[in-house]
Image (cartoon, rainbow, N blue to C red):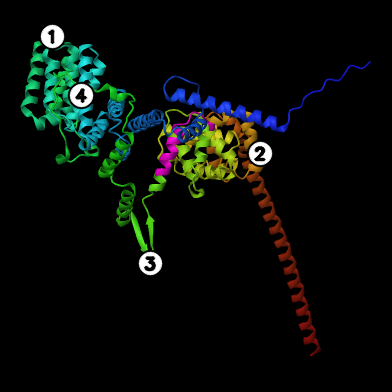
Amino acid sequence: MDSPRTSLSVPSAVDVAVELAQAKERQNEKDKENLMHSLTGKGGVYIPPHKLRRLQGELMKNLQNQDMVFQRMQWEALRKSINGLINKVNTANIKDIVVELFSENIIRGRGLFCRAVMKAQMASPNFTCVYAALAAVINTKMPEIGELLIKRVAMQFRRAFRRNDKLVCLACTKFVAHFVNQQIVHELIALQLVTLLLDKPTDDSVEVAIYFVKECGQMLSQLCPPGLHAIFERFRAILHEGEIDKRVQYIIEGLFAVRKSNFKDYPSVTPELDLVETEDQVTHELSLDEHYDVLQNLNIFQYDDNWEENECQYSEIKKEIIGDSSDADQESEDEFVGGTDPVDTVVEPSGSYVIDDRTDLQTISLRRTIYLTIMSSLDVEECAHKLRKLQIKEAQQKEICNMIIECCSVERTYLKFYGLLGERFCRLEKMFQDLFEECFAVHYATIHRFETNRLRNIAKFFAHLFFTNALDWSSFEYIRLTEDDTTSSSRIFIKVLFRELSEQMGLVMLKQRLEDPTYKQSFSGLFPRDHPKNTRFSINFFTSIGLGGLTEKLRDYLKSTPKQIMAQFHQGSSDNSDSDSSNSDSSDSDSSDSDSSDSDSSDSDSSDSDSS
């Protein structure tokens, strides 16, 4: 008897759609919960950047009324922006960084600004002059921020001095010295600091004082000559006492030599960083003896009940400082167009203006962008992807090839990263292969302009392209290996190139490639056969670099050349002898014919006389 068949319930399409929608909603709720955890600092899972941006956009729509979360998001964005601007400031871009800093709400983030500047200065003391110049510009518009920064540096120095932390003391004193140079702080604090360091002299305290005086001595000689004289008298007394280490005594003697040269090697303010006019400077009078409140609570997020009102007020302040963005752009554009040196203005018949820019600003900016992209990439694939995303015009694609070669050449040693990057571009498009071939011809023609180390890196780069067949071997047609057509630099280039090819391919494979009949015309310059002198030079060159096996056929040719010349000579002489014999035979026959004709004429004359 058959068992009854169980009926299976098949879900309908509607039920499936409902379940999918519910699952998607649960996933979205989970993602939002993770986002909330990450924003409130309570942990959470990692969210990819693209997904984070999408969730932030959705959260902005749904949480406009939740001011706490919204303000925290704005605070995090402000912190990241200020840190990024401080980390990339330098002498060349400080003016642009100042404008971008004022574009942010720096009053709300003044604690973040001071902390970022102090951390950056501590990490890179060599850029202290740049950070001091940046603080000087900020101080002219917002003196309370400059005062807060000075107070924090002073309190940090006091803590480091009590803890005998020499490195932090050196960094702080250097920062204070450049504050004095920029006249952000009164010179009295400099005299007070040196007095504190030399009151009970030790090796470390004297050394810190010496470095401090070197940094701001030139400015102190202008602002307070008696104070500087008293400092050097104290150094002289310490030197005469002789209680400190010999090394420190030598450093004091070096300081006196620096003073004698009027601190020529330690200028107070370089022209590039002299950004504030004298009448605009705001100088703060502070003391190291007082205890200041450094407002550490400004470093963390705090809820603001009047967020919108404060933001509107800062917008007005920003307009007063840097003006409206559209007005600034228009002014800069008018100023650029009005110049006569960098551009030429041509008036067309229609009345419109055509500007011919001859400054190459776009090319320089593009090369800078390409350089930064290459330097910031971790691997070849990422670098190639970033460079392709730049959307460079076709006419400027050659700059990518030039910058790859230039970046490779300036490295201490050759990095395979650049060879793989060049190979990647050659395989992406035929256009890049042609561009690299042009670069090979140009660099070989101008190879004498490069230093030896750069020359070697360039040769190894192109050797990688040839070895991987990313670059066609017909490019060797630009090389003619003769004594007259090469220089010492080009011979080094060829030597490094072929040694690298021999290491990568092996001598046998390299020889097979060079004997390929397809490239016979391209390799004719490497193995010249037009004159025995050039042939011998090529053979001797490859033999001297350890690759004499590549010239076996050329040696056979040079051995057989005299025999061919003698054979041609003998053949030419035999042809000449044959022609001479034929000429003599023809002359003999002509002479016999002339004799017979003469005898016939004499017989006819005698017969005529007899008849008469």
CA–CA distance between discs 3 and 4? 60 Å
Residue 531 visible in the displayed image: no
What residue does disc 4 label? 151
Q: Are marks 3 and 4 in contact (CB under 8 Å)?
A: no
- The residue type indicated by label 1 comes to Glu
What residue does disc 2 label? 516
Residue at far right of view: 1
Left or right: 236, with 96 as reference point: left
What residue does disc 1 label? 243
Query: Looking at the image, is mark 3 or mark 4 earlier in the sequence?
Result: 4
Left or right: 402, with 220 as reference point: right
Left or right: 539, with 605 as reference point: left
Predominant SS of the magenta segment: helix
Left or right: 493, with 573 as reference point: left
Secondary structure under the numbered disc 4 in the rendered image: helix
Q: Nearer the viewer, mark 4 or mark 2?
A: 4
Q: Nearer the viewer, mark 2 or mark 1?
A: 1
Which region shows up in magenta?
Answer: 365-381
- The residue type indicated by label 4 comes to Lys
Residue at far bottom of view: 612
Magenta stretch: includes residue 542: no
CA–CA distance between discs 3 and 2? 62 Å
Residue 20 visible in the displayed image: yes
